[in-house]
Amino acid sequence: MGGEFTLIGRYFDWPAPPGILGVGDDCALLPVSPGHRLAVTTDLLVEGRHFFPDTCPEALGHKALAVNVSDLAAMGARPLGCVLGLSLPRVDEAWLEKFSRGFRALSDEVGCPLVGGDTTRSVAGVIISVTAMGEVSEGAALKRSAAKPGDDIWVTGSLGAAHVALELLQGQYPEHAALLDTLRPWLERPQPPVAFGSGLSGLARAAIDISDGLLQDLGHILKASGCGADLDYSLVPAHPALKELDAAIVQRAVLNGGDVYQLCFTADAAARADIKALALRHGIEARIIGRIRPGQGIHVSAAPVPLGKEGYAGFDHFG
């Protein structure tokens, strides 16, 4: 079976792209293009908190990287590389083979090579930490503080599927249990629009990835930008498989459900044609769902269920 370095060599020592010093030294070396800034993000996944113990390890490898590269997309950054910290209660060769396969497949797909990391033994459960790095043109990063009144509010993809999948796994809505096979991939294999996000640099103003719920995450943009927002619920794209569920369930999943890893961003109305063309080139669904306005807070029109104060809350680890 071997020790730590055998494990790393067998499952995670992949050839680095030209110009990058990857696994095998004390540090990785990554080139950053002239006129660009380094974008860095990190996420932690803990067994029992972020994923179930029986989650498919290949899907888990995919998601461990996906939740990080979605942050790069939200900054308008092009991925450069990532490092992986993996804490395991024991060495399980079959689990590692599948986990590394899922991680590497997405790594290759989005151009974010694994360039280093660490492994250790945990006292209980699997803990995964990924730090991803990218580059974005100086002055063109999609900061949360950059939204302006009059901006369109856009979202990519569809919303709600991951939240309902989680609720089904928790035993809710047994009458709709057959939906789990359709919705579970949206929870365990999110598909962040990485290349599209990089292309938004210079087109959009502010952006965020939807990890804790549309309203909560949009609220972060509004707070940083000192603005308010008007949303039209009828324009918010719910996953089509949710149509058989009660309207209140769908509304909560769409507005408050997390684990989406799609983008919510704002842009001047003059950029509409360019954004639609960019979405078409990348095969991405992108829709306008509202507008930034002066003031504070979010007003949601056309919602089938009235939103009380709790209707704006998203996921909070310590809430």
Image: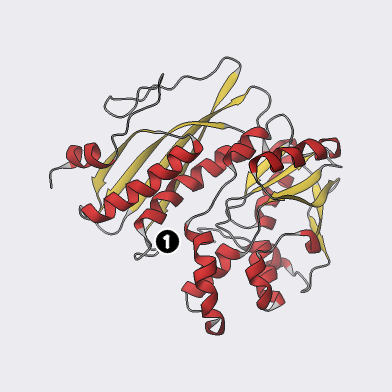
- Height in image: 236 above or below 248? above
Name which residue type carries label 1.
Arg
Element under disc 1: loop
| Rendering quarter of residue 309 | bottom right
- Height in image: 33 above or below 266? above
Residue at 66% across / 47% down in the picture? 284
Q: Position of residue 177 (x, y in %)?
A: 52, 79
The one of 1 and 283 positioned closer to us in this rendering: 283
The one of 232 and 147 positioned closer to us in this rendering: 232
Residue at 54% across / 50% down in the picture? 191
The residue identified by callout 1 is: 49
Residue neighbourhood size for the residue with mark 1, other residues' Cα within 10 Å, grouped as few (<14), some (14–19), many (≥20): few
Residue 69 is left or right of residue 45, and the answer is right
Q: Position of residue 152 (x, y in %)?
A: 81, 45
Residue 242 is left or right of residue 14, and the answer is right
Q: Position of residue 107 (x, y in %)?
A: 44, 39
On the rendered image, what quadrant is the C terminus found in?
A: bottom right
